Amino acid sequence: MSYGKVLVVDDEEHIIELVKFNLENNGYEVISALDGKEAITKAKQENPDLIVLDLMLPIMDGVEVCKKIKNDKETENISIIMLTAKNDEADKIVGLEIGADDYITKPFSVRELIARIKAVLRRNNDGRTKEVENIIKIGDITISNEKHEVTKRGEKLELTLKEFELLRMLAKNRGKVLSRNFLLDEIWGYDYFGETRTVDVHIRHLRKKIEDDDKNPRYIETIRGIGYKMK
C-alpha cells in the first residue's frame, strides 16, 4: 500500500537516491526530477501528493518552480517542502511566502524529512475529510469552504492554501485568542520547532489582502506575546 506519491527534485543524484530509497522503504511511491523545468512537467503529469523541492536548481530555481506550481490551477494543491543548503532565515521566509508548506536545511536527517512529509500529508488529508461550515461571514469577508475561496465585498481575494486555512481557523474561532504554537500545530500539522515567525509572516500577508489598512487591522488582532484573534 502506498502512503502517497512524492516528487523529489534535486540536481544531486545521490540525494535523490538517498531520499528515494528511504521513502520507498516507508511505503511511499517516489518519482524524481533533476531540474526546475522537469519538475513542473512531472508535477503536471504525475500529480504527486507532495514535492521535496531543492532551492538551488539548474534551468529554473526552486523559488520560481514553487511560484509556478502554486499559481497553476492544476497543481496549486500539491504540498511542497523546500530543501535548501542555505541556513539563512530570509530564504526560509521566501519559501513560506510563496506557498511552500515547510522547509528543511541541508545537511538534513532523512528521519526528520520523513517525519515532516508525514505531518504535511496528514494535515492536508485531515483538511480534506473534516466537515466544516460551508460559509463563514465576518464583516465584509465571506469564506466559502465548498469553493475554497474568500471574497471581500463580492470580489475574490487571491490567497495561498495556508493563508486560506489560517483565515478559516481564525474565523471559526472568532473572539478566541489562538496562540502561535496552536496555529502552527493546526495549520502546519506539527510543532514547528519554535519557528513562530511562520505564523507572523502569513498573518502579515493575510492583512495586506483582507484589510483596508493593514497597519490598522480591523479583522485580525495581535495579542502581544501570545498570538492572534479574529475580532
Image: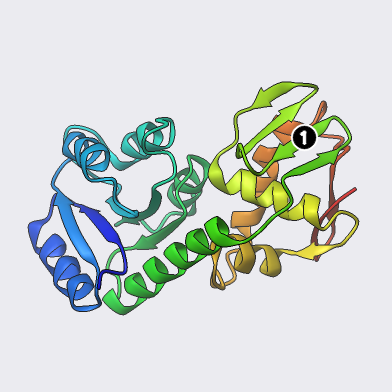
Image quarter in which the N terminus is found = bottom left
Q: Amino acid at mark 1?
A: Thr
Residue drawn at the location 31% of the way across and 63% of the way down: 4
Q: Height in image: 214 above or below 189?
A: above
Mark 1, Cα crowd under 10 Å, few <14 / some 14-19 / many 20+, is some
Q: Position of residue 181 (x, y in %)?
A: 67, 69
Locate residue 213 relative to residue 190 in the image: left or right.
Answer: right
Residue drawn at the location 27% of the way across and 58% of the way down: 6
**Of residues 77 and 207, the one drawn nearer to the viewer in this rendering:** 77
Q: Position of residue 150 (x, y in %)?
A: 68, 34
Locate residue 35 relative to residue 191 in the image: left or right.
Answer: left
Residue 146 is at least partly visible in this image: yes
Residue corresponding to mark 1: 142
Q: Height in image: 63 above or below 29?
A: above
Residue drawn at the location 82% of the way across and 34% of the way down: 215
Locate residue 54 relative to residue 124 in the image: left or right.
Answer: left
Q: Position of residue 79 (x, y in %)?
A: 41, 52
Q: How many marks?
A: 1
**Of residues 143 and 135, the one drawn nearer to the viewer in this rendering:** 135
Residue 214 is at least partly visible in this image: no
Q: Position of residue 185 (x, y in %)?
A: 61, 69
Q: Height in image: 13 above or below 208?
A: below
Asked which secondary structure carries label 1, the reply is strand
